[in-house]
Image (spheres, grey):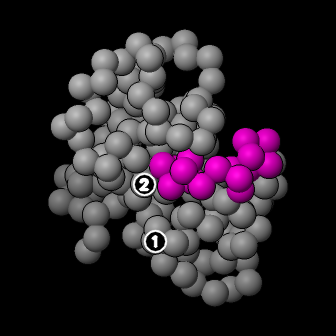
Amino acid sequence: MRKGHASKTRRASGATLIAALALAAAGCGASSPHAGSSQTPTNVPAYVNEPFSHQQQLIAAGGRLIVTYGCAACHLAHGASASAPSFASFAGHKVRLADGRSVLVDEPFLRKSIADPAAFPLAGYSERPMLDAVAHLGLARRPQQVAELAAFIEEVGPEPQ
């Protein structure tokens, strides 16, 4: 197996593992995500978050949101889906926008795209599913959740070359 391919396969598998761990950490059967803050669920002891950095906590919270909100169905699907780019190959790469420009998917891009998908429509993808999801979830009014989602997407993305 080629070195780059093996690394991407491990990263994609890692994305699935992170999402599964995030779901487990959230407590299977949790009725709803937290409303705009990264609070520890009441069924998890407070010491569980202590050894983790702020960035690690953002990533874990983002993983829980990815699972809870159903983002994983389109964005973490093995081999990507025709309706959405795969998180495993998104962050750290340049993407083509609908207007023909090419931009790097970095933290500012992710935060803006998550809060307002119409800001950077991607070539080859309908922006309607993201517009509907963001409106339904109220992400434009939840900067903490946007930061958590962006942190998770960056974490599961490819390593910089």
The image quadrant of residue 96 is bottom right
What element does badge 1 sit on? loop
Query: x, y (%) of residue 22?
Result: 40, 30
Q: Nearer the viewer, residue 47 or 130?
A: 47
Nearest the viewer among 53 and 46 is: 46
Amino acid type assigned to the residue bearing label 1 in the image? Asp
Q: CA distance from mark 1 to mark 2?
A: 10 Å
- The residue tagged 1 is 106
Q: Which residues are magenta?
A: 133-149
Residue 85 lies, with reference to residue 68, above or below; the image says below
Q: Residue at x 35, y 43 (%)?
A: 57
Magenta segment includes 16: no
Instruction: Read off the residue under disc 2.
Output: 151
In the image, taking residue 80 as reference, residue 140 lies left or right, namely right
Instruction: Write the residue at 28% across / 63% down.
Output: 159
- Whether residue 152 is visible to the viewer of this picture, yes or no, is yes
Q: Is residue 129 visible?
A: no
